[in-house]
Image (cartoon, rainbow, N blue to C red):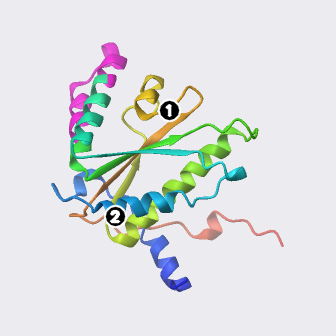
Amino acid sequence: MQLSPNQFNELIRNRRSVFPKQFSAGKIVPRAIIEQMLINATWAPSHGQTEPWHFNVFSGDGLKKLANFQAEMYRQQSGENFVQTNYQKLLETPLLASHVISIGMKRTTAKRIPEIEDIEAVACAVQNMYLTTTAYGVGGYWTTGGTTYMEGAKSFFGLGEQDKLLGFFYIGEIEVPSATGKRVAINEKVTWID
């Protein structure tokens, strides 16, 4: 390993969510970075080495397909709760990104692994994606908005009935950096039992 422990600590502590409105309009993140991000995601731990993640990468015209799908599904599902500004946001936000990756969990049933463990494995994969964006100096943001929890959306993303759509990872070149992070002291979140 070439990273020192201090470099690794800095990488983790400098990870930030960078929202689509902070991206540089029209700038495309090189495909090689996206591919490395996905490779790194697949090195996340999973119980029984099931690797339950499933990703779809939207770019170029694919971003328009994603935006149109989500906006129309929202229109169909919302009924009398339809809000035009929410519809417009679904049409426009994906177009601010260089790439959007749908985050799916393919349910592992053969090994009787609890569903929560498949979800946790996918979350670990997303953390690897976040750290990769930080290492490469590009922006990333995991959202559970849009069609994430709509059952009818799953087939669009190659997911079956037992699978879950866990959100979307937006990627773009950073124009406006995120604020410096802060955390509470670990003694407020950790109990030592000696």
- Under tag 2, what secondary structure? helix
On the picture, is 80 further left or further right than 154?
left
On the picture, is 125 further left or further right than 17?
right
Q: Position of residue 112 (x, y in %)?
A: 76, 38
Q: Is residue 80 magenta?
A: yes
The amino acid at mark 1 is Leu
- Under tag 1, what secondary structure? loop
Dot label at residue 2? none
In the image, residue 117 above or below residue 27? above
Residue at label 2?
Answer: 32
Q: Position of residue 120 (x, y in %)?
A: 61, 49
Q: Earlier in the sequence, mark 1 or mark 2?
A: 2
The amino acid at mark 2 is Ala
- Residue 107 in which image quadrant: top right
Query: Magenta segment range?
Result: 73-92
For the N terminus, give its image quadrant: bottom right
Graded by Cα atoms within 10 Å as few (under 14), some (14 to 19) or many (20 or more), the crowding at tag 1 reads some
In the image, residue 37 above or below residue 93? below
Residue at label 1?
Answer: 159
